[in-house]
Image (cartoon, grey):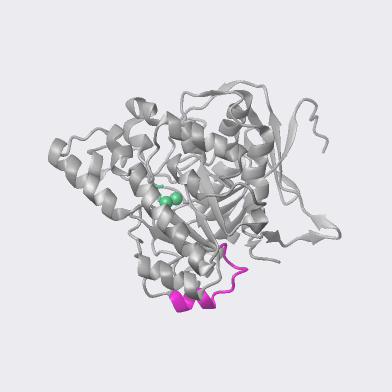
């Protein structure tokens, strides 16, 4: 097959290292088939899925079950995190670290009730050499903020208060404590979804990624939206940590350039639109974004807010380096290609109808973008072409921590 790629950009496939595909147990919101298809359409060729499913991925058996499901249903390459609980430490230590990306720690409350305390984190840092990926928000600060706002405003709190409840202070307090602990124990720590300017002071942009002990992720919604968007989007934008101010957003964009932020993921966290209706405290947190992450970042490139080199470094190269990803399917002197063809100047508007995620809505609906994904190649084969997916799935399990 010959593709006329004149005027198109050929980019490496995106590795989205933070998604919630909801499979098993929450498959009314999304499943590995539906969400990986949305990923494919967005130029994402590998995903790494979080453990807050039902059952949670906190045992080797649950991990193997997920890997089996994905090998039957994934449109892209795939990997998983194991989640920490107060009592699965031995299981985590024994697990073959090539079969999962790292250990996810919920140090802060969010979807799935998997929060653990400082003692558990400490134990993990002293006894495991797996990469620890942490959701960092100080729950005592959040509880205090909730109580004080409840007292002042009752249940009719507007969603624009979310950043004050899931505050800058809650993020900074948890992230600084974790960074300090990791330095003390010399353990590898990756802070998930960094959302504030303040936290950036805790990261070092001067070393190459492969030599860093402490690394940081931010996610596309924090680079695109800010506080002003709550007026328009309300609960749709409710996410933990909260999307914060314009100042925070700009600082995060700059931190890509200064290498204080190492990876960009999506934190794709679908909930049904029905579930996103209701009073502030009852609406679940999480935003679907996997399908539009790359086109949205390319729009920021077009607007001069970030360079194309940084986008590709943080979305493709850095996750591969950080999680030491390798693939099966080695051919002589290389690997089968995961690539994307992009038409950089072909304006279109995102809508719920263009959205392939099972939830069928997007916070980006109504946004006009210029870049379109025309082709996505997974393992050397065209799997997405001009709006259509191609016959058989060929996603493969990623291998992690390969030296
Ligand atoms: C995520 C979810 O819904 O699974 N929600 C969110 O607000 N980001 C969980 C998480 O990443 O904290
Ligand atoms: Zn989280
Ligand atoms: Zn998440």
Q: Is residue 5 above or below residue 62?
A: above
Residue 191 appears at what percent x and percent y? Answer: 49, 53
Toward the viewer: 364 or 24? 364
- Chain part drawn in magenta: 89-101
Residue 30 appears at what percent x and percent y? Answer: 45, 48
Residue 71 appears at what percent x and percent y? Answer: 60, 60
Residue 362 visible in the snapshot: no
Toward the viewer: 35 or 300? 300
Residue 380 visible in the snapshot: yes
Residue 393 appears at what percent x and percent y? Answer: 64, 52
Q: Is residue 364 magenta?
A: no
Q: Is residue 96 magenta?
A: yes
Q: Residue at x 40, y 32 (%)?
A: 245
From the viewer's perspective, tell me whether residue 303 is left or right of residue 54: right
From the viewer's perspective, tell me whether residue 58 is left or right of residue 262: left
Tell me the quarter of the image containing the C terminus.
bottom right
Q: Residue at x 49, y 44 (%)?
A: 200
From the viewer's perspective, tell me whether residue 135 is left or right of residue 70: left
Toward the viewer: 173 or 167? 173
Q: Is residue 120 above or below residue 337?
A: below
Q: How many marks?
A: 0
Q: Is residue 10 above or below residue 136?
A: above
Q: Quadrant of residue 288?
A: top left
Toward the viewer: 102 or 372? 102
Tell me the quarter of the image containing the N terminus.
top right
Q: Is residue 185 above or below residue 275?
A: below
Q: Residue at x 35, y 61 (%)?
A: 115
């Amino acid at each position: 097959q010959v593709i006329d790629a004149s005027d198109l950009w050929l980019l490496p496939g995106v590795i989205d290292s933070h998604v919630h595909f909801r499979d098993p147990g929450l498959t009314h919101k999304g499943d590995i088939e539906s969400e990986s298809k949305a990923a494919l359409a967005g130029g994402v060729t590998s995903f790494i899925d979080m453990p807050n499913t039902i059952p949670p991925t906190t045992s080797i058996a649950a991990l193997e079950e997920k890997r089996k499901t994905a090998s039957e249903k994934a449109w892209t390459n795939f990997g998983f995190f194991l989640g920490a609980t107060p009592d699965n430490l031995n299981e985590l230590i024994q697990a073959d670290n090539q079969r999962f990306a790292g250990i996810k720690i919920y140090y802060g409350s969010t979807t799935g009730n998997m929060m653990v305390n400082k003692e558990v984190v400490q134990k993990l840092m002293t006894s495991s050499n797996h990469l620890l990926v942490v959701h960092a928000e100080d729950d005592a600060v959040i509880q205090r903020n909730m109580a004080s706002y409840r007292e002042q405003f009752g249940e009719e709190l507007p969603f624009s208060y979310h950043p004050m409840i899931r505050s800058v202070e809650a993020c900074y307090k948890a992230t600084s404590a974790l960074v300090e602990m990791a330095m003390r124990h010399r353990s590898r720590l990756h802070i998930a979804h960094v959302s504030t300017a303040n936290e950036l002071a805790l990261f070092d942009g001067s070393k190459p990624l492969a030599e860093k002990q402490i690394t940081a992720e931010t996610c596309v919604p924090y680079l695109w939206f800010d506080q002003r968007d709550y007026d328009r989007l309300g609960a749709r934008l409710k996410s933990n940590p909260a999307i914060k101010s314009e100042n925070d957003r700009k600082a995060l964009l700059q931190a890509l350039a200064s290498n204080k932020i190492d990876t960009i993921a999506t934190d794709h966290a679908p909930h049904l639109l029905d579930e996103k209706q209701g009073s502030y405290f009852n609406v679940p947190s999480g935003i679907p974004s996997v399908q539009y992450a790359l086109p949205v970042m390319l729009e920021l490139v077009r607007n001069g807010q970030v360079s194309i080199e940084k986008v590709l470094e943080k979305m493709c190269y850095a996750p591969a380096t950080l999680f030491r990803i390798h693939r099966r399917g080695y051919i002589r002197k290389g690997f089968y290609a995961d690539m994307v063809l992009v038409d950089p100047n072909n304006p279109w508007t995102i809508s719920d109808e263009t959205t392939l995620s099972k939830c069928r809505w997007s916070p980006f609906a109504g946004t006009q973008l210029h870049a379109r994904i025309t082709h996505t190649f997974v393992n050397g084969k065209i799997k997405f072409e001009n709006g259509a997916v191609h016959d058989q799935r060929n996603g493969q399990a990623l291998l992690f921590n390969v030296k």
